[in-house]
Image: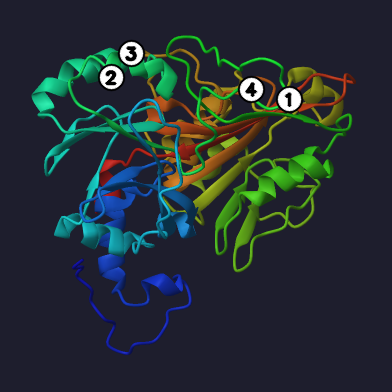
Amino acid sequence: MSTTTTQPTDGQHIEDRPAELDAYWPSRIENDRIWYGHHALPGSRFVCHETETVYTVTDIKNGGDTFTLAPCHKANGLSDGFSDPDLPDHFVDNICDLAGAIEAGDLTPLPTGVLKTVDESTYFSVGDLTVAIDVDATETTPLLEQLDPPNGPVATDIAKIAPTLESVDAEPTLFGPHDAATPPDEPMSGSGHEYTERRPRGAQAVPTHFVPVQPFSKWTFEDKTIRDWVESSFEEGEIILNACAGQTELTPPPGGKILRNDISGERPNLDFEMDVAELASHPDLEQGSIDRVVFDPPWSLYQANLRYEKNMVSKDGTHDIDLTTLPFETPGPEEKTQIGHSRLAKEGFNWLLKPGGEVLEITFHGSSMSARLGYERQERLIFDPVGEGKCVIGSRDQKVRRRLDDFF
């Protein structure tokens, strides 16, 4: 394999970058982030020309700069279950090495729903599966259209896609997730029956967990379960914005910092005392300066009136905010007569977040950052206070779409 590297002249490790990137100039690192960062996302897949093996991105750290490229489990034909490929983790472990491997032709990205012909095989991905068939791409196009129509994959396991694949006069090879489970024709142990997943057509496979917690107090993060979930997402060196901080102080990651905002001005150790919808206008906050946002507003008008001196992220009262001070465009009166605080807050989060950054929100409704802004749902947790109140939903959404000004 050949990659292009540029050695810093002094050969010294720079403290604010991971050791895996010591060999590269900051300008090279930034360039590769811009042009190849969209490949360093959970579940992104590549085929290695040398081993004819599909690899997937896991264990992402340092905002996507470092990660593991792990070999997918493999099934030879339709009758076999997945088996461990017995290969070590790939030699690529950082964004610059990944860029070099792609540029050198050692790795080819395999985006979902796209046909890629590599040597004599055609690869296409459906859900969590990647299929390799030794036929021309033009012959597999109708096959892909059957398996992955515009409204989402019809099926994503061997048993369900087998009838369609059998229509092709070629023996397919299938690559499953790095942690692929037992073959699909084996029943779940102890269940007494075969498990079949039922999912509405077009539904997204977002990891969702149901978590029992104690009845909620006034301060969300006094609950250890919710607090641990939020803090477990923090990565070393991150700048985190706690947008509605409240009384409880979260623990920053090693080498990182938590910026606390609360409109009341009466909470401990505040960095800002602003309406959350106006945060992006603060002169000390720059565009693309935040790695992660924690957003825990009052969940309802009742809760705001009872416990938060009537302060809440509301749909009304936007006229109190001078929209001209915000560093992003907002609809004019002729387009929209009312712009909610929540929308303005999230537009501000989007302006403040780095590419690849995440928003963690605790709400009653489970809807966080808009797909319109270029966010993808990564995780949902349903926190159930054992029947003593309403469930609340934790969401983790990642910024995956780059703006034009990210390239300058």
Where does label 3 land, which residue?
163
Q: Earlier in the sequence, mark 2 or mark 1?
A: 2
When the figure is inspected, residue 395 is found, relative to residue 291, above or below; the finding is above
Where residue 123 appears, x then y in whole percent? 23, 34
Residue type indicated by callout 4: Ser
Where residue 241 appears, x then y in whole percent? 59, 49
- Secondary structure at badge 1 equals loop
Residue type indicated by callout 1: Gly
- Secondary structure at badge 4 equals loop
Where does label 2 land, which residue?
165
Where residue 67 appears, x then y in whole percent? 44, 57
Where residue 177 appears, x then y in whole percent? 45, 39
| Residue at the image position 85 percent from the left and 34 percent from the top | 218
In this view, the mark in front (2 or 4): 2
Residue type indicated by callout 2: Leu
Q: Earlier in the sequence, mark 3 or mark 4?
A: 3
In this view, the mark in front (4 or 1): 1
Q: For the residues labelled 3 and 4, say whether their Cβ atoms are less than 8 Å apart.
A: no
Q: Earlier in the sequence, mark 4 or mark 1?
A: 1
Q: Earlier in the sequence, mark 2 or mark 4?
A: 2
Where does label 4 land, which residue?
314
Residue 97 shown left or right of residue 75 in the figure? left
Q: For the residues labelled 3 and 2, say whether their Cβ atoms are less than 8 Å apart.
A: yes
Label ID, residue 372: none
